[in-house]
Image (cartoon, rainbow, N blue to C red):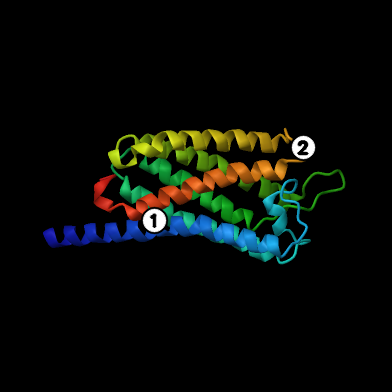
Amino acid sequence: MLRERLSAESGRKRCIYWFSLSGVVAPALLLLLYIVASLLNPGFDHVLRTVSQLGVSTSNFPWILNSGFILFGLLMLPMASGLYLRFSRHFMAKPLFFSLALSGICVALVGVFHAGRTMADGRPVLEGMLHIIFASLGILSLTVGILAAADIFQRYPAWRGFVWPSIAVSAVALVGAVLFSQEVVPGWNGLVERVFYSIALGWVWIVAARSFLLPPGEAGR
């Protein structure tokens, strides 16, 4: 029995290690593919146009960015699992897991359903509407996950330094998403989107890196 418990604990620690690594890779890979897609589309206006417009059929090699969305979303699933394993004793661990996992699924679907085409009256076609829905749900669920993480972090000394930064990131992401959706700053919509998404994805990378470097038994168990 003791041997089985030790084996299970060892397996849990390995999962936390490798699952956390997926969270480190996810934002970096998406950023890399975004840069590649940008370089292959010279003249693309990054201040006015949204990131997703690099993934529409009228762009050069749209599959590059769309692959980035899909891979990022899939890699978020093990990252969410890793944080759940690390903090499983906290009652907010499940909301954290489901929020981050839902965000990953939505981002992956953003890579499947593309923006761009509109009907004669200017409204987006079904594919474009789904793209908007999944993109909005993705950032909203990520924001909820960040707040859930902030509540967890305050219980563990090794993570307390992440509490207020997490709250600030969630506030910036939420305000930025509202400004973006309402087009409060016309002509700068692409830049607004990049700012709040970069901050949110930066949180993912930093938290995943912290979880990857911190021994599993020292925080969250």
SS at badge 2 = loop
Q: Position of residue 151 (x, y in %)?
A: 38, 34
Which residue position holds label 2? 186
How many dots with numbers? 2
Looking at the image, is 59 positioned above or below residue 133? below
Which labelled disc corresponds to residue 82?
A: none
Which residue position holds label 1? 20
Most distant residue in the left direction: 2
Q: Amino acid at mark 2?
A: Pro
Q: Amino acid at mark 1?
A: Ser
Is residue 137 something that shows in the picture? no
Residue closest to the eye, 149 or 211: 211
Q: Position of residue 66 (x, y in %)?
A: 64, 60
Which quadrant of the structure image shows residue 65?
A: bottom right
- Residue at the spot 67% in from the left edge and 55% down from the top edge: 113
Count residues near mark 2 (Cα–Cα under 10 Å), then give few for <14, some for 14-19, many for 20+. few
In the shown orientation, is residue 61 left or right of residue 166?
right
Which quadrant of the structure image shows residue 95?
A: top left
Mark 2 or 1, which is nearer the eye? 2
Is residue 209 something that shows in the picture? yes
Q: Position of residue 203 (x, y in %)?
A: 48, 45
Q: Which of marks 1 and 2 precedes in the sequence? A: 1
SS at badge 1 = helix
Looking at the image, is 212 positioned above or below residue 137? below
- Residue at the spot 83% in from the left edge and 44% down from the top edge: 122
Marks 2 and 1 sit apart, C-alpha to C-alpha, by 38 Å
Q: Position of residue 175 (x, y in %)?
A: 60, 33
Count residues near mark 1 (Cα–Cα under 10 Å), then give few for <14, some for 14-19, many for 20+. many
Task: Report the quarter where the C terminus lies.
Answer: top left
Task: Report the quarter where the N terminus lies.
Answer: bottom left
